[in-house]
Amino acid sequence: MRKRRKGSLAVFPGSFDPMTNGHLDIVDRGLAVFDRVRLAILLNPEKQPLFSVEERLAIIREAYRGNPRVEVDTFSGLLVDYARQVGASVIIRGIRAISDFEYEFQMALMNRRLDPRIETVFMMPAESYSYVSSRLVKEVFQLGGRVSDLVPPVVERRLSEKYGTPLRQGGAARVRARRRKG
Ligand code: PNS
């Protein structure tokens, strides 16, 4: 078994609107290396999220209920300032494909310039999640597609509540239900 860094805390920042199985996969990988992983939701007044910050916090808490090594919090301002405040020396980011790399690389180097003591660690999710994003999950669900393999059950339930469509019905039925709602 891999040895975890004792007492280590890694911050995994993001929008998590909503959390996907790709995020869960990265958290698992983070837990294999660090003692604790803290998901940090950015409070971004410029974005119009589907799920409020409170909803996103509740989703993540439910997904990790009973796992004391996973924490969730919100932050605003500079990520490196937040990481320092909570005693984390590592930022985790997931890289799904080369297309993610340029933006992530820029952010990592900027963060390093802002605080060289905080290291960014890139982790790759399982290939089966390489195409999964929160944006596509929302779009597919809204258009009646199945997302049950792409998100944890709590997210599927919350999506159903958000769009007012019952769970466990096929995509076409959900589209019809949505059309009826107008
Ligand atoms: O899930 P996302 O939307 O790709 O996450 C982006 C996030 C939250 C990691 C990024 O926007 C961020 O760190 N924002 C905080 C502001 C900051 O520190 N900016 C300078 C770093 S380049």
Image (tube, rainbow, N blue to C red):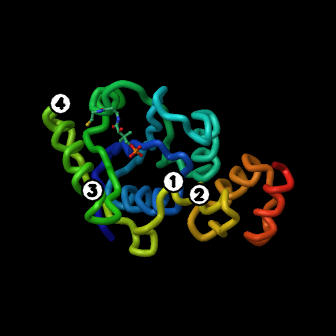
Q: CA distance from mark 2 to mark 3?
A: 26 Å
Residue 91 placement (x, y as % from top left): 30, 44
Q: Is ligand 1 within 8 Å of the beta carbon of the residue shown at mark 4?
A: yes
Can you tell which mark lies on residue 135? 1
Few, some or many residues within 10 Å of mark 1 (<14, 14–19, 20+):
few
The amino acid sitting under disc 1 is Arg
Q: Earlier in the sequence, mark 2 or mark 3?
A: 3
Q: How many marks?
A: 4
* Real-space CA distance between mark 1 and mark 2, rounded to the nearest whole angstrom: 6 Å
Q: Which mark is residue 26?
A: none
What label sits on residue 139 in the rendered view? 2
Q: How far, Cα to Cα, is label 2 from label 4?
A: 35 Å
Q: What is the C-alpha distance between the residues marked 3 and 4?
A: 18 Å
Q: Which of 48/101 is in front? A: 48
N-terminal of the pair, mark 3 or mark 4, is: 4
Residue sitting nearer the eye, 42 or 2: 42
Tag 1 and tag 2, C-beta contact below 8 Å: yes
Question: What residue is pinned by disc 4?
Answer: 114
Q: Secondary structure at mark 4?
A: helix
Numbered disc in front, either 2 or 3: 2
The disc labelled 3 sits on which kind of residue? Phe
Q: Earlier in the sequence, mark 2 or mark 4?
A: 4
Which one is nearer the viewer's eye here, 12 or 176?
Answer: 176
| Residue in front for this viewpoint, 137 or 69 | 137
Looking at the rendered structure, the secondary structure element under dot 2 is helix
Q: Position of residue 136 (x, y in %)?
A: 52, 59
